[in-house]
Image: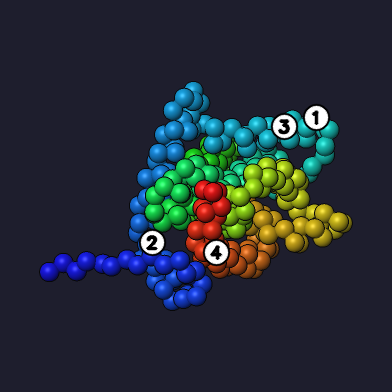
Amino acid sequence: MHKVKRIVYTPESGIRNPRLLLEDFMESLPQMHALGYRLFLRNLKGMYRQSLLGLFWSVIPPLVTSLIWIFLNGQRVVDIDVPGISYPLFVIIGTILWQTFAEGVNGPVRGVTMGKSMLAKINFPRESLILSGIYEVIFNVLIKIGLIALVFVTFQQMPAWSTLFSLLGFASLILLGSTIGLLLTPLAMLYNDIQKGIVIVLQFAIYLTPVIYPEPKSGLAAQLMQFNPVAPLLTTTRNLLIGAPTPNLETFFWVSGASVVLFLLGLLVYRLAMPIIIERIGS
């Protein structure tokens, strides 16, 4: 005889019973993935429905940024010397990796914002909105990897054995960006300033990350970069792609491990905070 599962809704916060909170979270993982994937497909179709360039929009922003800096460096308006690799290849890979991180930050906020209308009407695993945003980031990364392969052919850059491990770097950049985005999502649901602030901070932070120039060895920029968690991930991933030495490998794994822990913690905070936020935005 089929056993009917009984669901009891209570006004008590899940923080009062962490064991039940974790069990409920684990049981709803398949639902989160299934619904998140469907929302991702819906958002993807809607995004490119009236677009002439379609999927190319995922690579146009880093390409435009790269072309600007390639032009400035070529005209000696700025003088950036990168040993062991041509500057166009260096900056194109750097901007693609930075774009991957930036999309990771925006992914959770964007996913929840696009599903905001459902939150107060339907009871479903709200984490699926987060996953839909992350799936979109992963989809865009696959397109960007195709662009990197094309750039390698154009600049006659032979892939190294370490190129395969750069996929771990892409995953770490997505994870770090998604963790930051996830932790900001509850606030972004209440205040529109958060999304506008993210745009401004990312525009500034790109210049404190070795995206368009190599990592400085001394000076204020070098000191600030030590506190930038994106720097070791981006530098290591770029070096893995081109087969260069990876001196920041230990920091890379520390940042990646911390991102995993903070992401799981962020999911629990998100689950606890969403009922309160839905009540606030629905009133």
> What's the residue at 43%, 45% (across, down)?
118
Does residue 122 sit above or below 59 in this rendering?
below
Point out the tag, 3 or 2, that comes first from the N-terminus: 2
Q: CA distance from mark 3 to mark 2?
A: 43 Å
Q: Secondary structure at mark 3?
A: helix
Q: CA distance from mark 4 to mark 1?
A: 50 Å
Residue 33 percent coordinates (x, y): 38, 54
**Numbered tag placed on residue 269 in the rendering:** 4
Q: Is residue 145 visible?
A: no
- Which residue, given by chain and number where applicable, does mark 3 sit on? 68
Residue 50 percent coordinates (x, y): 46, 24
Point out the tag, 3 or 1, that comes first from the N-terminus: 3
Q: Inspect the image, locate mark 3, and give the three-letter code of the amino acid beneath it.
A: Ile
Residue 123 percent coordinates (x, y): 39, 54
- Which residue, given by chain and number where applicable, does mark 2 sit on? 29
Point out the tag, 2 or 1, that comes first from the N-terminus: 2
Q: CA distance from mark 2 to mark 1?
A: 53 Å
Q: CA distance from mark 2 to mark 4?
A: 16 Å
| Residue 67 relative to residue 273: left or right | right
Point out the tag, 2 or 4, that comes first from the N-terminus: 2
> Of discs 2 and 1, which sits in the foreground?
2
Q: Secondary structure at mark 4?
A: helix
Q: CA distance from mark 3 to mark 1?
A: 11 Å
> Of discs 3 and 1, which sits in the foreground?
3
Q: Secondary structure at mark 2?
A: helix
Of 208 and 84, nearer the camera is 208
Q: Inspect the image, locate mark 2, and give the three-letter code of the amino acid beneath it.
A: Leu
The part of the image, by quadrant, that contains residue 243 is bottom right
Badge 2: few (under 14), some or many (20 or more) residues near its Cα, within 10 Å? few
